[in-house]
Image (cartoon, rainbow, N blue to C red):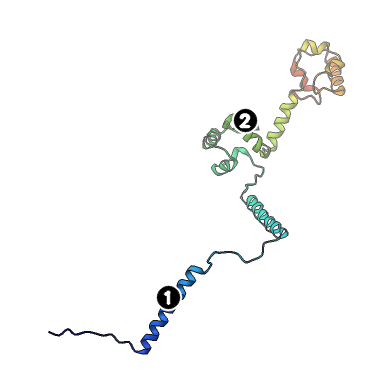
Amino acid sequence: MKLIKSHFVFNRSQQNGIFLLVIIIILFQAIYFFADFSSESNSEALSPEEIESFQAQIDSIKEARAEADSIKIYPFNPNYITDFKGYTLGMSVEEIDKLQQYREENKWINSAKDFQKVTGVSDSLLATISPYFKFPNWVTEGEKKKENNRNIPSVKVSDLNTAKSEDLQKVNGIGEVLANRIVNYRNKIGGFRSEIQLKDIYGLIY
């Protein structure tokens, strides 16, 4: 039995193709091993003025964002604080509920002190939001009258009947004019019999 030997014979075109393929492979390997693929920046370094300009732009953007995120507080009546309003003011859910429950009983907050007593907010939060409290005029006028009532001489009727004008001027809120007015009225009625008679003196709110 004869063995048949197979011989592969390439024509010149095929030989040239193989040779070109080998050259391309060698070329890519050389590029892979010897080429520098590091991402070095060929651009020139920024000058200090350019860096400062970029930093100023960044700071400006940050300030604008902070201002946009901040919540501005406008004067408001604390009796009508909603859930959302209380949340933005920094109140807790419990504090808001206490206020709303108080209002449901048809009771009113008339001062910052009342607000803290009802809600139980901290001193720091009260100091932050109380300057924005806005009450009706009749409330503020009432508070002024209460403050003026503290200027009434806290002395007995017998002392009022014997006190001189100089003695009355030592009481906080009592000036020379008002002290003389008290003495003149006392002399006119023959002496005070009750503190309620102080109501009749002009300028002295009792």
Q: How far across and down, in percent of the image, does residue 110 sit?
A: 64, 33
Residue lying at 74% horizontally and 23% vertically, measured from the top left: 150
Pointer 1: what residue? 25
Residue plotted at (45% across, 71% down): 29
Labels 2 & 1 near each other (Cβ < 8 A) = no
Residue at the far front: name it.
2
Picture layout, residue 170 above or below residue 140: above
Q: Give the residue displayed 60% in from the left and 64% down from the top.
A: 41
Pinpoint residue 108: horizontal percent, then vertical percent. 60, 33
User: In which quadrant of the rendered view does residue 142 lie?
Assistant: top right
Where the N terminus falls, by quadrant?
Answer: bottom left
| N-term-proximal mark, 2 vs 1 | 1
C-alpha distance separating marks 2 and 1 = 89 Å
Residue 48: where, in percent of width, then height?
A: 72, 58
Give the residue type that dot 2 points to: Asp
Query: Helix, strand or loop at disc 2?
Result: helix
* Disc 1, SS: helix
On the picture, is 53 further left or further right than 10?
A: right
Q: 48 or 109: nearer the eye?
A: 48
24 with respect to 136 (left or right):
left
Decide: few, some or many residues near mark 2? Use Cα within 10 Å; few <14, some 14-19, many ≥20.
Answer: few
Rendered image: mark on residue 114: 2
Mark 1 crowd level (few <14, some 14–19, many ≥20, 10 Å Cα): few
Q: Quadrant of residue 109?
A: top right
Looking at the image, residue 30 sits to the left or right of residue 110; the answer is left
Q: Quadrant of residue 170?
A: top right
Q: Is residue 38 left or right of residue 167?
A: left
Query: Vertically, is 9 above or below 52?
Result: below
